Image: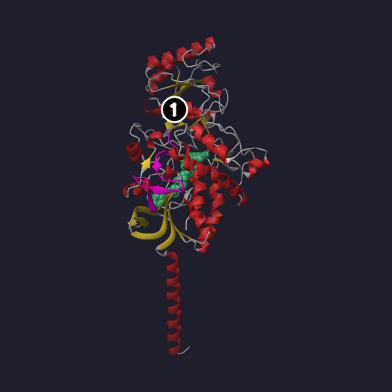
């Protein structure tokens, strides 16, 4: 190659390289104007983006975490739906109308009828669709389950690897995420979904009274404005943010949470900054049996340590429950899940100590999922959330429970066992006295899986301002609406996850 040819060759080569670099940087760098901006790639955000991308819209998804899925990575995965193909194939007569009536009845009319109606209408469509795209439905589904106030019909669904806290395994709770991933990848490949991970919503942009996008911050601290015709907040709840939680629920002094750590309520706060209405925090409800493995951590892990006290239908209690004053306060075999939850919620610091003896420890199903009897003994040696002693008095000293009160409570309970009649609280299951040393005390809490307060939206998920008017261009979906909207002041099975996924998808399909 002579000098001139070599010069031409090198010139062409550098032009090709620059064009390729330009192209790839254009591919990497999203255009700043989209049809839909979804903030949060979790249970609601993913199906919302997929729904919009399926109709050819260009969607930008902003996710603060390095991985997508949000709470789909840890949820128990129970959904509820009525009028599904699967129910019909199993001869179960049911309908969205029945589901609606039952949610409103179980929640004592405290859920938002417009949101519940939309959720239960969309729920069977979601389940049918999930099955059609390969969701690995559990063979036992649909079923009546008892960890929440039970529905009168078999309308709870979960995946083959989900909802078995006794055998959590790697895939527990991930059936939904795994089903959504191929669709998500397809739209990422086609460019209809552009994803920015490790990028956080800083604030919403309002122009001419309309939300036109958001300022987002990248991992390196750089901020950027992104614009879209529709902005969807799908950032989840605030049950992992003790400061915000206390601010909106001042009567709860200490938050013990199992929510995903990303549930910080940032979307709620960004919307409130531009005048959005927030509601329902006072409907807050606790899940029971939380164990704070690391004292003072404020965290209770649902999958690795959960005391099975939700319902006597799943495990008849062999323990005596006392509060922080060492006093019994309920029939331990109270059958109504909601009454159980509210009884524990009413105790000081939502503490419920489970007192049992050596006989009760080994007499049946383990008290803590997924712990074996040996593991319970090991934890009792550590004395961090579980204590062991040769006498009730010593147990009181070790735990800090008032000695006389604890002695009295156990003596009264043992007397009730002897008489076969619990005059104080009406416990029916009175087989086992607490008398065989060593004695154990497990500290459990009413804890938060989800948050109840949320953004006020209308029945088509437009965020409302304090005057009750829609904020143009702004939508919210998922737990950001608050459990108070979808299930009221009671946990109705599946009424967090189902509305998140079903309404996420619905919204994505509706936006123009
Ligand atoms: C252990 C556990 C078990 C549960 N089991 C059930 C069940 O069986 N049935 C049921 O109905 N409900 C259940 N729930 C509740 C239900 O799973 C959640 O309410 C639901 O998954 C929440 O969906 P979401 O999309 O609103 O939030 P998420 O799935 O948490 O998604 C929110 C996403 O937004 C991102 N994000 C947050 N802030 C920002 C920001 N500022 N900028 C950018 N991105 C942000 C987060 O990182 C996350 O990826 C359970 C909850 C827990 C914790």
The answer to whether the residue bearing label 1 lies less than 8 angstroms from the nearest atom of ligand 1 is no
- Give the answer, above or below, for where 441 lies relative to 15: above
Q: Which residue is mark 1?
A: 342
Residue 233: x, y in percent?
41, 50
The residue drawn where x is 51% and y is 26% is 336
- Badge 1: residue crowd in 10 Å (few <14, some 14–19, many ≥20): some
- Give the answer, above or below, for where 409 lies relative to 238: above
- Give the answer, above or below, for where 219 lies relative to 440: below
Task: Specify the segment rendered in magenta.
Answer: 447-472
Residue 157 as seen in the image, left or right of residue 197: right
Q: Would you identify the image quadrant in which residue 19 lies?
A: bottom left
**343 and 309: which one is in front?**
343
Residue 230 in view: yes
Residue 480: x, y in percent?
42, 45
The residue drawn where x is 38% and y is 60% is 227
Residue 125 as seen in the image, left or right of residue 294: right
Residue 432: x, y in percent?
54, 17
Residue 219 in view: no
Residue 435: x, y in percent?
50, 15
Residue 154 as seen in the image, left or right of residue 22: right
Is 452 within the magenta? yes
- Give the answer, above or below, for where 110 lies relative to 69: above
**274 and 131: which one is in front?**
274
**Dominant secondary structure of the magenta stretch?**
loop
Determine whether the residue tagged by mark 1 lies in a helix, strand or loop.
helix
Color encoding of the figure: secondary structure
Q: Would you identify the image quadrant in which residue 92 lies?
A: top right
């Amino acid at each position: 190659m002579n000098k001139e040819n070599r010069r031409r060759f090198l010139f062409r080569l550098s032009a090709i390289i620059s064009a390729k670099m330009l192209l790839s940087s254009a591919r990497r760098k999203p255009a700043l104007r989209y049809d839909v901006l979804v903030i949060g790639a979790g249970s609601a955000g993913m199906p919302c983006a997929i729904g919009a991308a399926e109709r050819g819209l260009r969607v930008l998804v902003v996710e603060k975490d390095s991985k997508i899925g949000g709470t789909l990575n840890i949820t128990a995965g129970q959904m509820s739906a009525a009028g599904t193909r699967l129910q019909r194939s199993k001869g179960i007569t049911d309908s969205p109308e029945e589901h609606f009536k039952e949610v409103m009845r179980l929640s004592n009319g405290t859920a938002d009828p417009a949101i519940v109606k939309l959720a239960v209408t969309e729920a069977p469509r979601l389940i049918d669709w999930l099955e059609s795209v390969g969701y690995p439905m559990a063979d036992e589904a649909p079923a009546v389950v008892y960890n929440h106030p039970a529905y009168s019909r078999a309308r709870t669904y979960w995946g083959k690897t989900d909802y078995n806290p006794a055998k959590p395994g790697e895939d527990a709770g991930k059936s939904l995420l795994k089903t959504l991933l191929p669709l998500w990848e397809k739209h990422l490949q086609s460019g209809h979904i552009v994803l920015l991970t490790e990028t956080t919503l800083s604030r919403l942009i309002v122009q001419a009274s309309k939300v036109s996008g958001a300022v987002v911050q990248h991992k390196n601290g750089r901020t950027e404005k992104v614009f879209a015709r529709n902005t969807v907040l799908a950032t989840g709840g605030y049950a992992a943010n003790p400061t915000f939680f206390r601010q909106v629920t001042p009567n709860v002094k200490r938050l013990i949470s199992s929510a995903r750590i990303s549930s910080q309520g940032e979307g709620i706060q960004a919307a409130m900054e531009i005048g959005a209405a927030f509601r329902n925090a006072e409907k807050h409800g606790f899940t029971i049996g939380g164990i704070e493995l690391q004292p003072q951590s404020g965290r209770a892990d649902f999958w690795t340590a959960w005391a099975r006290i939700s319902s006597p239908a799943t495990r008849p209690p062999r323990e005596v429950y006392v509060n922080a004053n060492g006093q019994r306060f309920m029939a331990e075999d109270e059958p109504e899940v909601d009454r159980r939850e509210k009884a524990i919620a009413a105790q000081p610091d939502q503490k419920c100590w489970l007192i049992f003896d050596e006989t009760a420890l080994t007499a049946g199903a383990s008290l803590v999922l997924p712990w074996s009897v040996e593991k319970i003994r090991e934890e009792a040696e550590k004395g961090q959330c579980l204590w062991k002693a040769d006498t009730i008095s010593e147990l009181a000293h070790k735990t800090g429970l008032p000695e006389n009160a604890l002695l009295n409570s156990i003596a009264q309970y043992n007397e009730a066992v002897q008489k076969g009649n619990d005059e104080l609280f009406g416990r029916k299951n009175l087989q086992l006295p607490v008398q065989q040393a060593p004695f154990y005390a497990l500290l459990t809490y009413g804890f938060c899986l989800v948050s109840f307060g949320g953004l006020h939206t209308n029945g088509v998920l437009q965020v409302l301002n304090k005057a009750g008017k829609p904020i143009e261009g702004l939508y919210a979906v998922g737990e950001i609406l608050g459990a108070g909207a979808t299930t009221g002041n009671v946990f109705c099975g599946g009424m967090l996850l189902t509305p998140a996924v079903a309404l996420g998808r619905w919204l994505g399909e509706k936006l123009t």
